[in-house]
Image (spheres, rainbow, N blue to C red):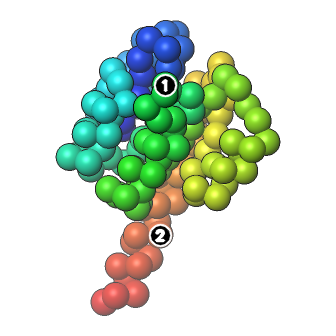
Amino acid sequence: MLFMLGWETGIEPNIRLTLPPVLEQHGFQVQVAANLSEALAAIRSHTFDVVLSDLNINAEGDGFTVIYTAHEANPACVTILLTGYPAFETALQAIHTEVDDYFVKPADIPSLLSTIERKLFARASLESLRESHDL
């Protein structure tokens, strides 16, 4: 299941409106939150394989707030940030926060899909390897 945080001032309307159907065509169940509090509640109450968030949300928090919550709720979750305002500082923070990828908007949809699929495959392979060593 993939979770996407999208709202009027967050993920751009073209991404917010076009990305969920594209992800669904690739086999993902997509849940979209309208605001930060709704996003955090959903992340805490569901297990998501992927969390996709805009970096700049509002005064309540930012994409890193979403990522911290996602990592807390499910450490194996693939996390991706989108930003229209790339900066060295936020890219560095993304590395330190162990964000799986950082895309500059407008994001290339095929590249985003490829990254999601690659990261999910890597996580599944790692989990399979761990399980085989636990036997």
Q: Is residue 61 left or right of residue 99?
A: left
Q: Residue most toward the front?
A: 59
Residue at 35% over, 79% down:
131
> Which mark is first along the chain, 1 or 2?
1
Which residue position holds label 2?
A: 126
* Image location (x, y in percent) of residue 4: 40, 31
In the picture, the quarter occupied by the C terminus is: bottom left
* Vertical arrangement, residue 43 with respect to residue 22, above or below: below
Single out the mark in the foreground, 2 or 1.
Answer: 1
In the picture, the quarter occupied by the N terminus is: top left
Q: Is residue 23 left or right of residue 95?
A: left
Residue at 51% over, 20% down:
11
Looking at the rendering, which quadrant does residue 28 occupy? top left
In the drawing, what numbered circle is on residue 76?
none
Which residue position holds label 1?
A: 58
Residue at 79% over, 42% down:
88
How crowded pointer 2 is (Cα within 10 Å; few <14, some 14-19, many 20+) is rated as few
* Vertical arrangement, residue 76 with respect to residue 26, above or below: below
Residue at 57% over, 50% down:
99
* Image location (x, y in percent) of residue 128: 39, 71
* Image location (x, y in percent) of residue 17: 43, 12
Q: Indicate the amino acid at tag 2.
A: Leu
* Image location (x, y in percent) of residue 26: 40, 31
Whether residue 36 is visible, yes or no, is: yes
User: Which is nearer the eye, 103 or 45?
Assistant: 45
Whether residue 25 is visible, yes or no, is: no
Q: Indicate the amino acid at tag 1.
A: Asn
**CA–CA distance in space, label 2 to label 1:** 35 Å
How crowded pointer 1 is (Cα within 10 Å; few <14, some 14-19, many 20+) is rated as few
Secondary structure beneath disc 1? loop
User: Which is nearer the eye, 75 or 85?
Assistant: 85
